[in-house]
Image: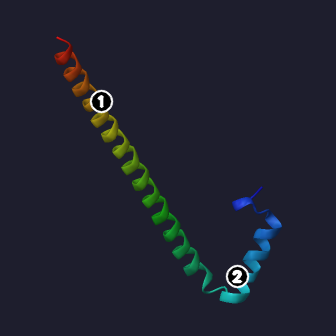
């Protein structure tokens, strides 16, 4: 199993077609741009994940405060 579920023959064919379409002089530039795009996507995904975790932690904390508030109200009414 290779990259994205593609085997070595499939990757070789794709690379050959890319050389034919773009030419060997343009491929390094395209590779760099693709690498930058993948890196920025990974960075955005990590930021998104950290925001989700932060939001979940904030929501959990807020929920605990609400539960404590309800418990205090119930305790006061029971006295």
Tag shown at residue 11: none
Q: Quadrant of residue 66?
A: top left
**Rendered image quadrant of residue 7:** bottom right
Quadrant of the image for the N terminus? bottom right
Q: SS of the residue at dot 1?
A: helix
Q: Which mark is residue 64?
A: 1
Query: How was this image coloured?
Result: rainbow
The number of callouts visible is 2
- Label 2: which residue? 18
Q: Is residue 8 above or below residue 26?
A: above
Q: What is the x, y in percent for residue 41?
A: 48, 64
Q: Secondary structure at mark 2?
A: helix
Pointer 2 local density, CA inside 10 Å: few below 14, some 14–19, many at least 20 = some
x 20%, y 23%: residue: 73
Q: Give whichever of 63, 38 is nearer the camera.
A: 63
Q: Percent x, y for residue 58?
A: 30, 40
Residue 72 at x, y = what percent? 20, 21
Whichever of labels 1 and 2 marks the residue nearer the N terminus, that label is 2
Image quadrant in which you'd find residue 20: bottom right
């Amino acid at each position: 199993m290779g990259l994205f579920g593609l085997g070595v023959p499939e990757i070789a064919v794709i690379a050959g077609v890319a050389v034919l379409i773009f030419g060997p002089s343009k491929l390094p530039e395209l590779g760099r741009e693709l690498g930058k795009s993948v890196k920025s996507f990974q960075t955005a995904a990590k930021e998104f994940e950290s925001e989700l975790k932060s939001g979940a932690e904030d929501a959990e904390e807020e929920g605990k405060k609400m539960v404590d508030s309800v418990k205090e109200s119930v305790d006061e009414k029971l006295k």
